[in-house]
Image (tube, coloured by chain):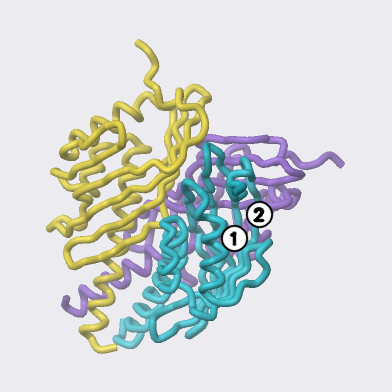
Chain colours: A yellow, B cyan, C purple
Amino acid sequence: MDPDALAALVRELADRRAIEDGVICYAHALDSRDYARLRECIAPDARVHYGRSGWLDGVDAAAQYCARALDPLDRSQHRVGTVDVKLDGDRAASTAYVCAEHVRDGRRFTVGGRYLDRWARTPAGWRIVQRELVVDWTDGDPEALRPPRA
Amino acid sequence: MDPDALAALVRELADRRAIEDGVICYAHALDSRDYARLRECIAPDARVHYGRSGWLDGVDAAAQYCARALDPLDRSQHRVGTVDVKLDGDRAASTAYVCAEHVRDGRRFTVGGRYLDRWARTPAGWRIVQRELVVDWTDGDPEALRPPRA
Amino acid sequence: MDPDALAALVRELADRRAIEDGVICYAHALDSRDYARLRECIAPDARVHYGRSGWLDGVDAAAQYCARALDPLDRSQHRVGTVDVKLDGDRAASTAYVCAEHVRDGRRFTVGGRYLDRWARTPAGWRIVQRELVVDWTDGDPEALRPPRA
């Protein structure tokens, strides 16, 4: 392989790895309630859509929405994978499958779906600039996700 | 690292990435009913075995079988991962875990198993030349997978 | 990219790949009851903690514990993924999500949790030196995991 081709291949592998890592980072940030870490994977002005939420503008709005949904839970687990990535220079699109468990008071509610993400290469690395969750199926007790009454 | 060792390592990383991407591509092709995309991951003359199907010869037979099973569904989600890859020059073998959801009319049937894949490096890239699905467990309502009566 | 930066990037990609492969190797070793293969991913003197097990010292103790739990089963499937890796020279830490199915006599018990792993780069490659399983949720019939009475 000539040096330029080698460097191009390494860059592509690194880009794909960074995008998959971003999807993983997002999941761990949510499940560890470490919302500050969302800034490692989504852009400050990212737009995020979680179905009932409508479009949320910016990482703070996204973090607040997630905190409201997840903080009352005993535990959550966003298993992500099967990430289909399409690179296009400094932009990318990916579809990641998610199977998310929400556990509260012995109840469990599972959401299966897809994260449709759009990415930009920024000086700080690859960041999600748009995320849309499409729900494909659910299972279990939706009460697990309802906040307890005050 | 000397240049040859570096190039060899990059090639190995790229090969493993391509094989994992092929497994992912197959899953997304099925779930988006984009059977034409199967040609991006399996060879034209690949042999595929889905249990009750017996051996199917060629990508068209595989696509037809999948279409018959999946087209009647409202939704499917083939989550793949935990891909164990063994490279051997221009050949490879992989075992990928799958957890496949099949949703129709509010019913859901889940199949857990393994894709045992054999691969060849072709001019167009790595392609599956043989795929066998081994079912390890199932859950839910098998009626979800039965085609509705005419 | 200058040659040193390129080599460093390749090394990082290879390290991350090796760590993810180690997590995958562990899962396949368990599910295929090929406990000898554990030596490909965990260090001889690794410490492992499976909740009720307390700390187990060394790969043999870990293998024996797993064999006692898994050999009576008809089937198991440790789906791992969403692996969050932190590299630090010749050390690393990772958190991997696991969804483990245990099947016996038509019963199924599912364990969802996290593998908290610590890694060392050894002459033979990256190896787990400490693994702790944290269980986040369970589902199904725990009897599946109880050994049949003699």
Q: Which residue is mark 1?
A: B114
Examine the rendered structure and indicate whether residue A148 appears above or below residue A121: above
* Visible residue check, residue C19: no
Examine the rendered structure and indicate whether residue A3 appears above or below residue C44: below
Q: Quadrant of residue C140?
A: top right
Quadrant of the image containing the C terminus of chain C: top right
Q: Which residue is mark 2?
A: B136
Image spot of residue C69 (x, y percent): 69, 46
Other residues around mark 1 within 10 Å, as few (<14) / some (14–19) / many (≥20): many
Image spot of residue A136 (x, y percent): 42, 43
* Visible residue check, residue A15: yes
Give the residue at the far front of this rendering: B150
Closer-to-camera residue (A49/B19): A49
Q: Are marks 2 and 1 on the same chain?
A: yes
- In which chain is the residue bearing label 1? B
Task: Give the side of residue A136 with respect to residue C32, left or right.
Answer: left
Examine the rendered structure and indicate whether residue B90 appears above or below residue B84: below
Closer-to-camera residue (B75/A12): B75
Query: Residue, x 20% and y 73% (percent of image)?
Result: C5
Task: Give the side of residue C56 with respect to residue A126, left or right.
Answer: right
Closer-to-camera residue (C93/B138): B138
The kind of residue on which mark 1 rests is Arg
